[in-house]
Image: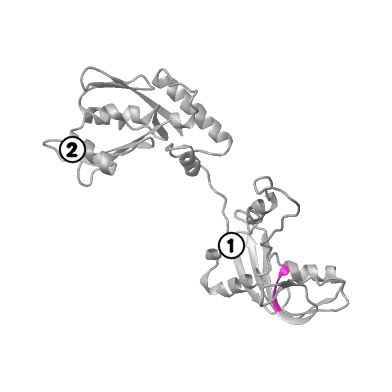
Amino acid sequence: MKIKAYKIHKGSGKEILIKDSAGLERGGADVTAMLDFLLEPYPDTLKTAWNLDDFAAPILRLLNLDICRKIARTNEATFGVDGSELTYSLYYLPGKLLTVTKIPGDNLTRQKATIYGLDGFFDDTMTEPVSAAALEELGNRLLTELGKIGISPKKLTSPLGAFLSGYKLPYVPTMGDTPDKYCEAQIYGNNCTAREWREALQIGHWASDECFMYDLSSAYPSEAARLPDLRYARYVYSKEMVDSAYWGFLRGRVTINGNVRCSPIMTRLPDGRMVNPVGCWNTFLTLDEVRFAPRASNGGRQLVRPSVKILQFASEGQKVKRTTILTS
């Protein structure tokens, strides 16, 4: 993308003069002529003015009062040209964008142009460039700087709008990515989430605004960034334990010997308390818990006749597949 810039100058009466950054200009009081000038096509270009409202006001004054009132009330209006099927449509969001659409008639190609304001991307100390060419140069420098952080905006309604239109947000897998026929895997996974850490206790004496829990604020985003891409998952059900699997949820009977120093399996009781029991019971476990248990309990863990769900994940563009386990 590159910038095309415009400057507007008021003349006598309603007459205005619009200049573009290439040195072309169009003047007069005919609103259709002004709009046609803005509609000139420039591929892969973002059309801009400095202050959008200051740019739009002289153009809107060329319209009759009823059309202006409609734009003020609904942000848009359509008007025709006498003796022709030709119509123009204006959509104006103050401070955001001015969109012009030329509709030549039924089944004919429409022309469309959107003008954005650039002043919102700079602080109050920045003064308006003296010419359209200088404004174009400033706009292109802005695009260059945004490109350095991976943003190639498709629109310039605001700094946030530019970011959202030009930055591909990272994919975060959700349960909705799992095909319906594998919904049992979701049930297993959900039964394994009851033991997650949700609480933190503040130790010491600090005012509420003097202590910030960075670990809690970043824990979930950090884990989500490492989640496998469920769009490339292969779901497999197995009655056998698959130690090579990448990720999994298991259901089975677990035995923790009473002579261990601390039981490696955490369980939530019906009253909500979290305990680390010993003995035998039926439960759902993640693959990581099953792998961790024998190391923590010196072999005290024994999983009896597990049924296992296995998922295989392949990263986009890669041939290597990672195996994930869902246990049942």
Image quadrant containing the C terminus? bottom right
Residue 73 percent coordinates (x, y): 26, 42
Q: Return the residue at label 2.
A: 66
Q: Is residue 245 visible?
A: yes
- Check whether the beta carbons of the residues at disc 1 and disc 2 lie within 8 A of each other: no
Q: Is residue 95 above or below residue 30?
A: below
The span picked out in magenta is 283-287
By secondary structure, the bulk of the magenta-drawn segment is best described as: strand
Q: Position of residue 29 (x, y in %)?
A: 20, 24
Callout 1: 10 Å neighbours few (<14), some, many (20+)?
Answer: many
For residue 244, say whether it is visible.
no
Would you place residue 145 above or below residue 191 in this image? Answer: above
284 in magenta: yes
* Mark 1 residue element: helix
Residue topped by disc 1: 230
Which is in the foreground here, disc 1 or disc 2?
2
